[in-house]
Image (tube, rainbow, N blue to C red):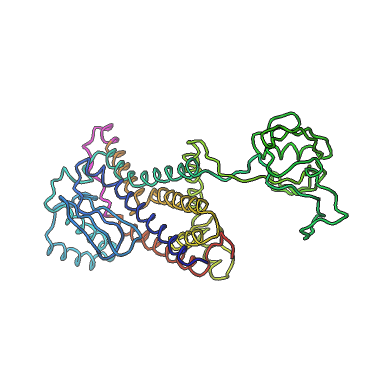
Amino acid sequence: MDVLAFVIGVLVMVIGLGVSIALHEVGHLVPAKRFGVRVGQYMIGMGPTLWSRKRGETEYGFKAFPVGGYISMAGMYPRTQPAPSEPALAGAAARAERRRGLYATLVQDAQAANAETLEGVDDSRTFHRLPVWKRVIIMLGGPIMNLVLAVVMFAVLFSGIGMQQATTTVATVAECVLPAGSTATECSAGDPEAPAHAAGVLPGDRLVSLAGEPVETFAEASEVIRARPGAAIPLVVERDGDEVSLTLTPIENQVEVTGADGAASVEQVGYAGVSASVERVRQPIWTGPQAAFENVGAVVRIVADLPARLYDTAYDLFTGGERDADGPMSVVGVGRLAGEVAATDAPILDRVGVMVSLLASLNIALFVFNLVPLLPLDGGHIVIALWDGLRRALARLTGRPEPAPTDATRLVPLTLVVVVLLVGMGALLFAADIFNPVQLLGG
């Protein structure tokens, strides 16, 4: 393995992840500032601050561990009444802990931290005072940014780089038909001549028509051949700029096929003995967005089935079983795959294509996962905003006073449980990606 190429691949993925996270937070930052919310911090990463600079009222910076990011908005939760001083907060927290235990202490601590973000801030510039639609836009901004990035990357992959496809140009022509299960690499005297070789097909020929019908793809040509075992098929190829008419008679070949019900059966199909040249073909511009939304559906299914998939990952980790290639991975696993791709002996465009695909899929995962309706994820804040909107609408319909904003600090204990589960999931996937990685490129 080319170690330097491996390291470059990992670095590209780390930088790509960092950019994705940074733009995710920009997706929150821009509408928050546009709607007048006071944003105290814009940080990439977690842990100790490595570098920061204050511009206006916002501190921008990087933290030690590139595993996330955040913006700090004033009044993510409503102001508690009255807003207590620090000694009062400390006393209240102590009394709460004695009287009601851990739950009350967690809530009180969250309210105290929220009160700090509100100090000296005009109430009209707080997040919770915004109309519901503005709160939803701010919280959707991050995931939508990841979705847009994925669409752009898939568009670059499919319409810019292009996808490898079998063309109608013949790459190789077999001289003979080897017996089924044979490991021979050369023809012997008793082997029958391959139909395409007998017909006079040459490497470099471009298939123009079969059975009188023009063919645009190699797949179309293969279907005609497979459907006519033993039949003489008129074949027209383009050779050195001229059209040449030939006759191809496919032989019968047994293949195993799997039906829609999953049952396997053996069919007699035609065989000619030709293979197609493979070229990168640029796809229509809508192919990228289509691929992105197909990936969204696939990731949604993974998230919906996450407990079972995590169990399988843990089981494979401790038993040494082969990991599901479509299962969840941590950034360690994605980085390792990127390094292996960069170090493979393949054309540079092929390696770039795989890297772009990995980054696009990573952004799809960020989009879907952040919309899970649990705090502290963006989806949890969206649900709270929509709940507030529903309560206000019901109050207007029934003629009651507008209710106070939902005090989400009371959900902090549940949020802590979610955080613990996320940390546990991350630790499991980290361990699995180190000690029992997904094998996509071979052993």
Please say whether residue 3 is one of the residues in the magenta stretch.
no
Residue 377 drawn above or below residue 50? above
Quarter of the rendering containing residue 32: top left
* Magenta-highlighted residues: 393-409
Q: The C terminus is located in which quarter?
A: bottom right
Residue 103 drawn above or below residue 302? below
Image coordinates for residue 284, horizontal then vertical, percent: 51, 35
List the single residue furthest toward the right: 190
Quarter of the rendering containing residue 210: top right
Closer to us: 405 or 47 = 47
206 relative position to 362: left or right? right
272 relative position to 64: left or right? right
Q: Residue at x 29, y 57 (%)?
A: 44
Closer to us: 274 or 94 = 274
Residue 156 drawn above or below residue 191? above
Image coordinates for residue 160, horizontal then vertical, percent: 47, 42
Closer to us: 375 or 366 = 366
Q: Residue at x 71, y 40 (%)?
A: 222
Image coordinates for residue 338, horizontal then vertical, percent: 47, 59
Image coordinates for residue 248, horizontal then vertical, percent: 80, 38
11 relative position to 228: left or right? left
Closer to us: 292 or 284 = 284
| Number of numbered discs | 0
